[in-house]
Image (cartoon, rainbow, N blue to C red):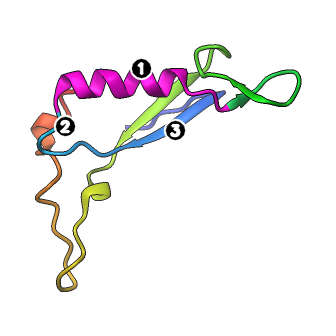
Amino acid sequence: MTGAIKQGLVVLLGIHADDTVTQANLLAEKIAHLRVFSDDAGRFDRSVRDIGGACLVVSQFTLYADTRKGRRPSFTAAARPEVAGSW
């Protein structure tokens, strides 16, 4: 699947096996209101909502890769695909 947005944010989202829908909702609200876009004065004072932008969210289980041992990363901390994909 291919996604595209014009002005907005690309979010690489790692979902932990213990994460809850409540936590996901709080994170989504936080991201939507981050003031990371500049206003007319050049200050970072506008959110993706303020500019009418969008978020392209990419599920990225590799963010939970554990590489402390050996040469093969472990992804046991990441949520199972059937769980992470349902959010």
Location of residue 84 by image quarter: top left
| Residue at the spot 56% in from the left edge and 27% down from the top edge | 34
Magenta-tinted stretch: 20-36
| Classed neighbour count for the residue bearing mark 1: other residues with Cα under 10 Å, few (<14), some (14–19), many (≥20) | few
Left or right of 74: which side holds 62?
right
Q: Nearer the viewer, mark 3 or mark 1?
A: 1
Residue 27 x %, y %? 36, 28
Q: Using the image, tell me which numbered label, if any, was put on residue 84.
A: 2
Which amino acid does the dot numbered 1 rest on? Glu
Q: Earlier in the sequence, mark 3 or mark 2?
A: 3
Determine the main secondary structure of the stretch shown in magenta.
helix
Which amino acid does the dot numbered 2 rest on? Ala
Q: Nearer the viewer, mark 1 or mark 2?
A: 1
Instruction: Determine which residue is flagged by label 3.
Output: 10
Instruction: Determine which residue is flagged by label 1.
Output: 29
Mark 3–mark 1 Cα distance, whole angstroms, equals: 15 Å
| Residue at the spot 19% in from the left edge and 78% down from the top edge | 72
Q: Earlier in the sequence, mark 1 or mark 2?
A: 1
Mark 1–mark 2 Cα distance, whole angstroms, equals: 18 Å
